[in-house]
Amino acid sequence: MEPSLVVFPQSGIDSDQAPDGGDWPDASRLLRAAAECQGHPGPILRALEQAEEALPVPGAGATKQLWEFFASIAAVDLVAARTLEPHFDAAAILQQASMPWPAASTWGVFAAEGPGTRMEASQVAGQWSLTGTKPWCSLAGQLTHALISAHTEQGRRLFMIELGHPSAEVVDAEWASRGLSQVPSGPLHCQQTPAQPVGDAGWYLERPGFAVGGVGVAACWFGGAVGLFRHLLASARRREPDQLALAWLGEADRLLASGASLLGWAAGLSDREELGPREAAQTRGEIARICDRLIQLSGHATGPGPLAMDDEHARRVADLSIYIRQHHAARDDAALGRMILENHSKEYAPW
């Protein structure tokens, strides 16, 4: 049976387009691969490497359908979504940079910074190379390529590297979390690793698609919350729910409806090239809040049994709990508040 699709409310996009990534023929095959993952990235990696058609990208008229596809993958398996989303993000970045997409490849995007680590880029005789350590390089040992940010004399710049090169060493790191346990995210150490620039210095963070990519991650979080709702609904159907169980189910439905509407709104902005950092921060923050609450509601409604005895449910809770920590909670809200103060005059209020 085909995995269930997650459909957002209409957002001004052509309603005749299918909620599976538009007309992209590989969407159904990737949904089936996600169902095979069961917390392991292998099936989705193989499916991505075998994709024959160009990947759909956001901001091209079908962003809602693309994010519905992300959410549908995540509702089935969050490890599949965590593996797939940066692969699609890399495709969107390369398209914006007018660079070709290599066939039979799998991609990560490594742009995090961390204390005590630094990646430097240098150029000799026209050839760029990277030297240093980059933290949080998820699946670096299983992917073929990566887009990786590095420091240059002109500022931070994005580069493309082949991860199989002998000068790029994946550093083993102990992963204590039970969430995303099969997505190793340790450091990558480079020693004069050949690299190809992608855009100018500063382009990666300043490009219009940066905010859009951040909301694509939130669509994956949302799909994880949908998976929790489906478990909650199945639990309520197995026995006559009491008033509290009905209230929790109703609240979960209300929260998902608001999140889906918000993602549909953001998708419409993206396709009109109007989705900026403020709108992206609003959407990511609210979807993260909804996920936090769905995790709490699920525990209250179903008790310890599923967390202890239901492998799929326990894995989904653990995976979503760590995945949404890509949102920095109150610190991201503080960044949003600063945007509002800096971008609006004293005579104007955004609401």
Image: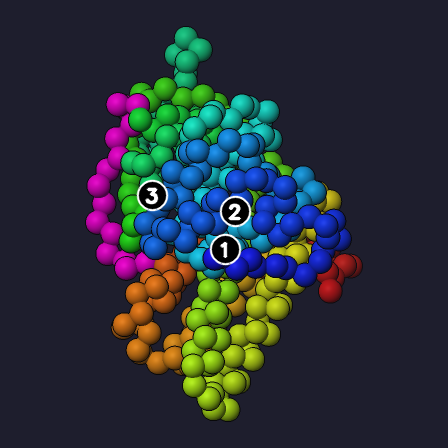
Question: Which residue is the site of mark 1?
Answer: 2
User: Are the two marked residues, 2 and 1, in contact with CB atoms closer than 8 angstroms?
Assistant: yes
What residue appears at the point 63 percent right and 59 percent down from the top-left corner? 8
Q: What residue type is labelled 3?
A: Gly
Predominant SS of the magenta segment: loop
Give the residue pinned by disc 3.
42
Query: In the rendered image, is residue 23 in sight?
Result: yes
Q: Is mark 2 on a helix, strand or loop?
A: helix
Q: Are marks 3 and 2 in contact (CB under 8 Å)?
A: no
Q: Name the residue under label 2.
A: 28
- Please tell me which residue lies in front, 47 or 80: 47
Q: Please provide percent x and percent y for residue 48.
A: 44, 38
The spot of residue 7 in percent (x, y) is: 61, 59
The span picked out in magenta is: 165-180
Q: How far apart are marks 2 and 1 (CA)?
A: 8 Å
Please tell me whether residue 230 is drawn above or below residue 47 in the rendered image. below
Which label's residue is closer to the chain start, 2 or 1?
Answer: 1
Q: Residue furthest top?
A: 125
Q: Which amino acid does label 2 sit on?
A: Ser
Q: Kindly identify the amino acid type of the residue bearing the numbered disc 1.
A: Glu
